[in-house]
Image (cartoon, helix red, strand yellow):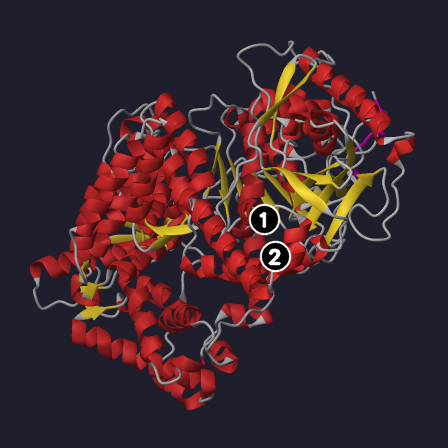
């Protein structure tokens, strides 16, 4: 290899991955030899080399055919399939286009002529034949050639070449290279013991995570023994298991990535292929911002961009965005167009006294730049507009980027350059279609930041690494994966594939290929290992029969667990345990959340502390239409208007149907006007709610007609203050009725579930007891008025029979002899809950149902059982 490069030859490799490895090997060799300056090695993968020379020829020969980029080729195939006669019958035209493109490339790689395909016939073959001819016709009309045709016009190499011997060459390329490049360069062989087993030992893991953890532990141990250790690791299902693999290798070789202070750095390993470019932060936020700046946008997407760190110049700016987001969640509709979102955000920021975050101005500027392009435009114009918009929006603070983020943004610029050169092929595009092309290209472009030469190289290919290493590890060597099963390419007749020796179509060729690779692997490293894991779906899996039958299997070491936890346990300091269940006493300027504070304190003291004093509230999310709380407010306000007009059960009994319908319509209209002044979900939802309430409220009034005679004494009296343990709790009682003898009844409407949740030493909801203590004079009953489509009734605590309906009996009053005595029990109970809260009692001691709907799992210390869920406590738990 060195001699060929020194002679000025260009060294060709079958894949970009092998070309990069060869390049790195030459660089390392020069550094090891003590050189400080050397010519850049001319090592290229074959496809890139062909494309490069075709582009050079275009520069000197105006009549030469152009070269389709990957983006252009993909889009041209998509158009061919969509425009075809049978496109309407395809479930997934995009998938059909990808399959056709892959099949046509395979035909070019194996020298399969279209005439041979035509001779076989069949529905799929005929479809591929028609699409291929139409694709070639369109290429001819455009004066371009697809990647599959790059080799056709190159009769002689434009420079002196050499090529490496590898099973990765396709047959057409191999024949061309043998004719024009002479004998291939043979790979060097590593020094290895004679008659060594193919692999030893064979590691068997229960899960893929354990398998990767064991491989990573082996790599770390070898590097500790020899800092110059180099390994090649083959993972057959790398695309599916990439996240698990990265976690395992980070835990062993880059544990700093699990720390909050991590700011990048070079790891001791690298993974081939990279991740989709769209997954990198600068690209992801750029694409997401494009998506939200046009059309109708759901709140979740606008919220994500508003809070994105890329738009915030300081922690204070990020805090303003978070506060504004919280306010929007209470006031915003489910979806708006982007301009309306910006206007609403600015208005609410002004109302709440929140400084508008800089994201608003940047988003408005970016949207203005994008709006300058009206109607369809050439991709070159779209690309220039996008770059300008990105630099004014999500890339305005790029000085904070890491090296990897800079590289990802530069790769997106290159991709935009490719799109900008596609005007002749793709023509003018609407904004939506142009953004689709960009998003698809970013998703399909694999990218890996350049961080230097990694000693541990992880490949997703089952191939010959060609270079020598200190160790090789082959993962996933099960009987179902090695040798690879026969997997014919779709659309091409299987018989035709086998006739032209397409390896994936033939089990015999796959077996021969596997044996060939095994004979090569033993020459590439003195240490060769293999492993496999049980299947998640099929259970225990057997090892590949191609591995030596006398090979000893070993299990994964017992200390190998989930990588994050293993590293944390190994590296973490010893922790001192401390039960801290008391907060500082409640003091000014702190304020309670009204009865909600006592409700949370009763269910779990920690919840009362977290929700009131730490403001650990769950974030609401605007929903289509009215939210459950808004629908409840509509019922409350409509009933308030109705009873303000009626005033008593006698008036209810006397009202005629027409007047009742008119009154209900007026009450519903007023309620909708007041609720929609805060958040208006739109006319369609207002009408749906009007129809619902118009049907629900008459039914509720029929329930009220069954009660004993009453007069409304207090109706939504406004905010009242209750005092317990020296603290004030805001209350809002819906209604107090006076019976004929002057006794009083307290009612609170519920539009959802309503149960007797006020009972017990630790009630799930002490709301009615708190309200009752505020209005205890001559009080004989309290009740929830349940007003919803499925339940229209009263859930009550009463010392009198028949208060809420004829025949209703007296309730148990929790064993108290009278309602007054029950009020004394409630007073002691509420005073104790309030005193505990005031004293800072914050023990994690939930009642039986407290954890069911709690949103504090992220900060709660309640013991958890994997099978049974959170541990709960009795109602009388301390």
Q: Residue at x 51, y 50 (%)?
A: 460
- 101 on left or right of 56: right
Q: Which residue is mark 1?
A: 639
- In the image, residue 285 lies in the stretch drawn in magenta: no
Q: Within 10 Å of the Cα at label 2, are there few (<14), some (14-19), or many (20+) other Cα atoms?
A: many
Q: Within 10 Å of the Cα at label 1, are there few (<14), some (14-19), or many (20+) other Cα atoms?
A: many
Nearer to me, 661 or 218: 661
> From mark 2 to mark 1, how far is it between C-alphas?
8 Å
- Quadrant (top left, top right, bottom left, bottom right) of the N terminus: top left
Residue 345, percent from left and from top = 34, 38
Quarter of the figure with residue 595: top right
Magenta stretch bounds:
868-877
Pointer 2 with pointer 1, Cβ within 8 A = yes
Nearer to me, 174 or 591: 591
Q: Main secondary structure of the magenta part?
A: loop
Residue 390, percent from left and from top = 25, 41
- Quadrant (top left, top right, bottom left, bottom right) of the C terminus: top right
Residue 292 in sight from this viewpoint: yes
Quarter of the figure with residue 90: bottom left
Residue 219, percent from left and from top = 58, 32
Quarter of the figure with residue 527: top right
User: The residue tagged with tag 2: helix, strand or loop?
Assistant: helix
| Position of 189 relative to 55 (above/below) | above
User: The residue tagged with tag 1: helix, strand or loop?
Assistant: helix
Q: Which residue is mark 2?
A: 697
Nearer to me, 463 or 593: 593
Residue 408, percent from left and from top = 33, 40
Q: Residue at x 54, y 43 (%)?
A: 243
In the picture, the disc for residue 857 is none
């Amino acid at each position: 290899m060195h001699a060929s490069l020194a002679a000025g030859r260009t060294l060709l490799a079958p894949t970009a991955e092998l070309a990069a490895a060869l390049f790195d090997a030459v660089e390392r060799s020069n550094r090891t030899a003590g050189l400080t300056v050397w010519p850049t090695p001319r090592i290229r993968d074959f496809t890139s080399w062909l494309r490069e020379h075709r582009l050079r020829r275009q520069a000197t020969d105006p009549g030469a055919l152009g070269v389709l980029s990957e983006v252009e080729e993909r889009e041209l195939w998509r158009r061919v399939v969509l425009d075809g006669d049978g496109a309407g019958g395809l479930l997934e035209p995009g998938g059909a286009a990808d399959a056709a493109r892959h099949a046509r490339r395979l035909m070019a790689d194996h020298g399969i002529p279209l005439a041979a395909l035509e001779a076989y016939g069949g529905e799929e073959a005929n479809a591929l034949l028609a699409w291929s001819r139409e694709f070639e016709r369109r290429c001819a009309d455009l004066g371009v050639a697809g990647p599959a045709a790059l080799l056709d016009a190159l009769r002689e190499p434009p420079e002196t070449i050499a090529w490496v011997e590898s099973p990765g060459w396709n047959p057409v390329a191999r024949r061309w290279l043998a004719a024009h490049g002479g004998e291939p360069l043979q790979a060097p062989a590593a020094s290895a013991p004679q008659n060594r087993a193919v692999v030893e030992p064979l590691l068997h893991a229960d899960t893929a995570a354990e398998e990767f953890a064991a491989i990573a532990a082996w790599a770390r141990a070898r590097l500790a023994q020899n800092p110059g250790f180099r390994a090649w690791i083959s993972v057959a299902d790398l695309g599916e298991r990439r996240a698990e693999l990265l976690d395992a290798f980070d835990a062993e070789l880059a544990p700093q990535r699990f720390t909050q202070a991590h700011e990048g750095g070079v790891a001791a390993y690298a993974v081939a292929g990279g991740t989709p470019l769209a997954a990198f932060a600068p690209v992801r936020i750029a694409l997401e911002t494009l998506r939200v700046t046009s059309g109708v946008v759901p709140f979740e997407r606008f919220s994500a961009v508003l809070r994105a760190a890329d738009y915030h110049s300081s922690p204070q700016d990020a805090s303003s965005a978070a506060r504004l987001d919280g306010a929007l969640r209470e006031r915003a509709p489910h979806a708006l167009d982007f301009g309306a979102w910006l206007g609403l955000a600015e208005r609410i920021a002004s109302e709440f006294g929140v400084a508008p975050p800089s994201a608003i101005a940047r988003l408005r500027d970016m949207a203005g730049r994008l709006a300058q392009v009206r109607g369809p435009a050439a991709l070159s114009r779209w690309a220039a507009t996008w770059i300008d918009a990105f630099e004014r929006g999500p890339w305005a603070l790029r000085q904070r980027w890491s090296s990897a983020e800079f590289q990802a943004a530069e790769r997106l610029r290159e991709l935009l350059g490719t799109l900008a050169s596609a005007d002749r092929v793709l023509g003018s595009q609407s904004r939506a279609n142009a953004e689709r092309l960009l998003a698809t290209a970013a998703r399909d472009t694999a990218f890996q930041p350049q961080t230097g030469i990694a000693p541990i190289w992880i490949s997703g290919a089952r191939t010959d690494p060609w270079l020598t290493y200190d160790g090789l590890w082959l993962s996933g060597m099960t009987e179902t994966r090695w040798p690879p099963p026969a997997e014919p390419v779709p659309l091409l007749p299987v018989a035709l594939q086998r006739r032209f020796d397409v390896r994936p179509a033939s089990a015999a060729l796959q077996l021969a290929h596997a044996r060939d690779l095994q004979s090569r692997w033993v020459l590439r490293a003195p240490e060769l290992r293999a492993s496999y894991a049980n299947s998640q779906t099929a259970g225990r899996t057997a090892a590949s029969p191609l591995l030596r039958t006398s090979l000893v299997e070993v299990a994964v070491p017992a200390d190998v667990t989930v990588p994050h936890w293993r590293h944390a346990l190994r590296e973490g300091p010893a922790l001192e345990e401390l039960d801290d269940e008391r907060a500082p006493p409640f003091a000014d300027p702190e304020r309670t959340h009204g009865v909600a504070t006592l409700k949370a304190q009763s269910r779990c003291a920690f919840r009362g502390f977290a929700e009131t004093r730490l403001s650990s509230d769950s974030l609401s999310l605007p929903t289509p239409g009215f939210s459950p709380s808004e629908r409840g407010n509509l019922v409350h306000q409509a009933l308030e208007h109705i009873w303000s007009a009626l005033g008593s059960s006698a008036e209810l009994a006397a009202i005629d149907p027409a007047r009742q319908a008119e009154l209900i319509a007026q009450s519903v209209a007023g309620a909708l006007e007041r609720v929609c002044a805060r958040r208006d979900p739109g006319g369609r939802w207002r009408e749906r709610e009007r129809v619902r309430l118009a049907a629900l409220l008459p039914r509720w009034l029929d329930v009220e007609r069954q009660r004993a005679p009453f007069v409304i004494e207090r109706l939504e009296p406004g905010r009242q203050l209750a005092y317990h343990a020296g603290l004030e709790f805001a209350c809002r009682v819906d209604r107090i009725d006076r019976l004929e003898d002057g006794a009083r009844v307290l009612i609170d409407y519920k539009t959802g579930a309503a149960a007797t949740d006020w009972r017990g030493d630790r009630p799930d909801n002490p709301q009615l007891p708190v309200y009752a203590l505020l209005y205890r004079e001559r009080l004989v009953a309290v009740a929830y008025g349940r007003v919803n489509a499925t339940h229209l009734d009263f859930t009550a605590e009463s010392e009198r029979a028949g208060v809420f309906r004829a025949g209703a009996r007296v309730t148990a009053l929790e064993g108290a002899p009278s309602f007054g005595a029950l009020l004394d029990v409630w007073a002691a109970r509420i005073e104790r809950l309030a005193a505990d809260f005031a004293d800072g009692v914050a023990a994690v001691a939930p009642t039986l149902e407290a954890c069911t709907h709690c949103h504090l799992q992220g900060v709660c210390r309640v013991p958890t059982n994997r099978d049974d869920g959170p541990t709960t406590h009795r109602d009388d738990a301390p």
